[in-house]
């Protein structure tokens, strides 16, 4: 009886030890199991990350759209107050190339002070009255009295998806060196939004060049030669250009059919809400077969093409919609995947695909060419 009890106790003790061992074994992971778990977590993260990124981009795109809508509505309010839209930029007007020394006229482009751009005109209508009050617009942009204010950051002019920076940038000359006024360089507040000059451009050729070439028919590439005499309005077919005074009645194609504003990311070139400094040049941050530095007007303005004299390597006129691989400093470029935002003259905002029909893009960019827009192509 005692032997049986002893055997029973031994068996129970052995069973307890085996049970404890099993519990210890079940409480841990083998190396293989650990690697499998890590692999599963990696797969899940890989599946979720694009969704998270897409959600963030959707939020940034909505913010950008809201910014452009505010800019478009501010332009309408400006028109209500002054019976016209703001000028692309304000320059001393001359048809002879003669101007007082105080306006520092560029002898080639005939750009001159004061230089204030469309963005400064909209400040009071963008809840930026305090900044507007700091600007001394009776003086040129580069005046010492404006040094601090013109470098200011205006959130409404910044797209959250745009790469390349949000801070003020130094204005450069044609050689890429800091442009000097009275021994000082100039820093301008950045903008990721630009105004439309239309199909045609009038940058360096709207000064000392007596004549220019414009397209009269974008479908047949017919052109004509015109006398410019410093008047960019003889070339531009969009709402914003040097000393423009565009009114609603001038937009013959309709404000709902005409692009007024769009995007230009700092990852390609610098743009500003402030205006144009004579003698400045906009330089691309990366090179492509078609891009290069361009005159000061491209600090605030872009165009869609075709423009007289602007031909591709095959000799055909260039139309460059959002993100077109010419990557001109004078075109619209966006860091949103698949396209970019544009604001029309009626204040509406649309997302335009990278693959938009080229002629449709040109038609939407002009304000008085009487083209019939087929929205099915958008």
Image (cartoon, rainbow, N blue to C red):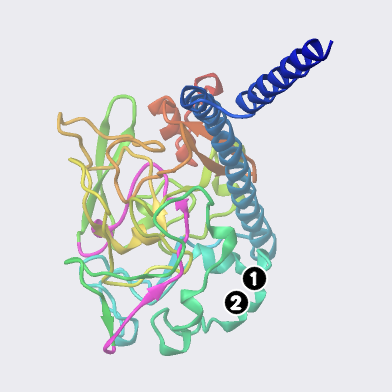
Residue 234 horizontal/vertical position (percent):
36, 52
Residue 231 visible (yes or no): no
Image location of residue 286, percent across then percent down: 25, 49
Q: Is residue 117 visible?
A: yes
Residue drawn at point x = 23 percent, y = 56 percent = 293
Instruction: Give the total of numbered labels.
Output: 2
Q: Is residue 9 left or right of residue 354?
A: right
User: Which structural element holds mark 2?
Assistant: helix
Indicate the secondary structure of the residue bearing disc 1: loop
Q: Is residue 345 above or below residue 6?
A: below
Between 54 and 309, the one lying in front of the other is 54
The reply, left or right, for residue 317 in relation to residue 113 is: left
In contact (CB < 8 Å): disc 1 and disc 2: yes
Name the spot of residue 189 as percent of width and height, x first.
Answer: 46, 69
Residue that numbered label 1 is attached to: 128
Range of residues picked out in magenta: 182-208
Question: How dense is the environment of label 2, judged by Cα within 10 Å: few (below 14), some, or many (20 and up)?
Answer: some
Residue holding disc 2: 131
Verify whether residue 58 appears in magenta: no
Q: Which mark is residue 317?
A: none
Where's residue 71, x and y in %? 60, 55
Q: Nearer the viewer, residue 44 or 186?
A: 44
Q: Quadrant of the N terminus?
A: top right
Query: Which residue is most to the front?
Result: 2
Residue 109 vertical position relative to residue 103 in the rendered view, above or below: above
């Amino acid at each position: 009886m005692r032997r049986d009890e002893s055997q029973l106790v031994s068996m129970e003790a052995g069973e307890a030890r085996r049970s404890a061992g099993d519990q210890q074994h079940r409480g841990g992971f083998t190396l293989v199991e650990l690697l499998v778990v890590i692999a599963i977590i990696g797969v899940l993260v890989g599946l979720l990350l694009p969704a998270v990124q897409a959600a963030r981009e959707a939020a940034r795109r909505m913010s950008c759209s809201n910014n452009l809508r505010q800019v478009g509505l501010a332009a309408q309010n400006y028109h209500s107050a002054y019976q016209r839209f703001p000028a692309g930029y304000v320059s001393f007007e001359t048809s002879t190339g003669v101007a007082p020394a105080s306006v520092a006229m560029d002898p080639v482009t005939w750009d001159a002070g004061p230089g204030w751009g469309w963005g400064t005109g909209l400040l009071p209508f963008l809840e930026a009255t305090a900044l507007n009050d700091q600007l001394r617009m009776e003086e040129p942009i580069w005046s010492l009295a404006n040094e601090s204010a013109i470098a200011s950051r205006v959130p409404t002019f910044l797209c959250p998806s745009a790469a390349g920076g949000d801070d003020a940038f130094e204005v450069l000359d044609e050689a890429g060196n800091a442009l000097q006024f009275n021994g000082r360089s100039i820093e301008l507040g950045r903008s990721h939004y630009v105004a439309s000059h239309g199909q045609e451009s009038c940058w360096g050729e709207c000064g000392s060049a007596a004549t220019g070439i414009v397209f009269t028919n974008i479908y047949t590439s017919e052109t004509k030669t015109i006398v410019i005499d410093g008047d960019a309005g003889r070339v531009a077919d969009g709402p914003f250009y040097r000393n423009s005074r565009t009114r609603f009645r001038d937009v013959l194609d309709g404000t709902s059919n005409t692009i007024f504003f769009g995007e230009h990311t700092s990852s390609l070139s610098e743009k500003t809400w402030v205006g144009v400094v004579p003698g400045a040049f906009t330089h691309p941050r990366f090179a492509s077969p078609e891009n290069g530095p361009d005159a000061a007007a491209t600090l605030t303005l872009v165009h869609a093409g075709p423009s007289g004299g602007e031909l591709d390597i095959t000799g055909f006129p260039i139309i460059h919609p959002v993100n077109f691989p010419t990557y001109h400093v004078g075109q619209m470029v966006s860091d949103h995947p698949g396209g970019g935002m544009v604001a029309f003259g009626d204040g509406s905002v649309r997302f335009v695909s990278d693959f938009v029909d080229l002629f449709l893009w040109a038609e939407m960019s002009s304000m008085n060419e009487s083209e019939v827009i087929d929205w099915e192509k958008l």
